[in-house]
Image (tube, rainbow, N blue to C red):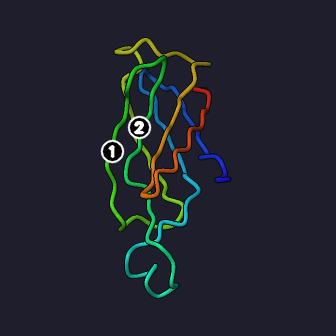
């Protein structure tokens, strides 16, 4: 079972800054061939607050192991406040899905 994605979210002056680190090996085709394993990396990631999508990205094999993402969104636009939960979900090439949550501080 994959470890959870570490999430830190901070509200300041109406803007929420989210920093997240996903725990994933992120094996590119070249690395997988060398290690005689199957290529596998996170190819899709979303973040939601109160059921509203605030971040969505398609990724490639060129992210590092345990990729770190940072993004910001306007809290007032979606009604987010301190104590609300940020839910980050990612899907990898093998179809493994992992969802983690963190509170806005």
Q: Position of residue 73 (x, y in %)?
A: 37, 29
Spatial CA distance of label 1 from label 2 is 6 Å
Quarter occupied by residue 46: top left
Please give the residue where the numbered disc 1 appears in the rendered image.
57
Disc assigned to residue 36: none
Where disc 2 sits, the SS reads strand
* Quadrant assignment for the C terminus: top right
Q: Position of residue 33 (x, y in %)?
A: 43, 84
Going from N to C along the chain, the mark reached first, 1 or 2, is: 2
Residue shown at the point (44%, 81%) measured from the top left: 31
Residue shown at the point (52%, 85%) measured from the top left: 35
Up/down of 27 relative to 82, above or below: below
Q: Position of residue 86 (x, y in %)?
A: 53, 29
| Mark count | 2
Quarter occupied by residue 100: top right
Disc assigned to residue 46: 2
Q: Residues within 10 Å of mark 1 (few under 14, many from 20)?
A: few
Q: Is residue 61 left or right of residue 10?
A: left
Up/down of 20 relative to 78, above or below: below
């Amino acid at each position: 079972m994959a470890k959870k994605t570490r999430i830190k979210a901070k509200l300041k002056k109406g803007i929420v800054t989210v920093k997240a680190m996903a725990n994933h090996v992120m094996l590119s085709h070249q690395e997988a061939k060398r290690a005689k394993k199957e290529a596998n990396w996170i190819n899709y990631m979303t973040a939601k607050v109160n059921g509203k999508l605030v971040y969505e990205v398609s990724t490639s094999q060129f992210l590092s192991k345990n990729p770190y993402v940072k993004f910001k969104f306007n809290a007032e636009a979606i009604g987010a406040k301190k104590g609300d939960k940020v839910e980050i979900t990612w899907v990898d090439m093998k179809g493994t899905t992992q969802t983690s949550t963190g509170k806005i501080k």
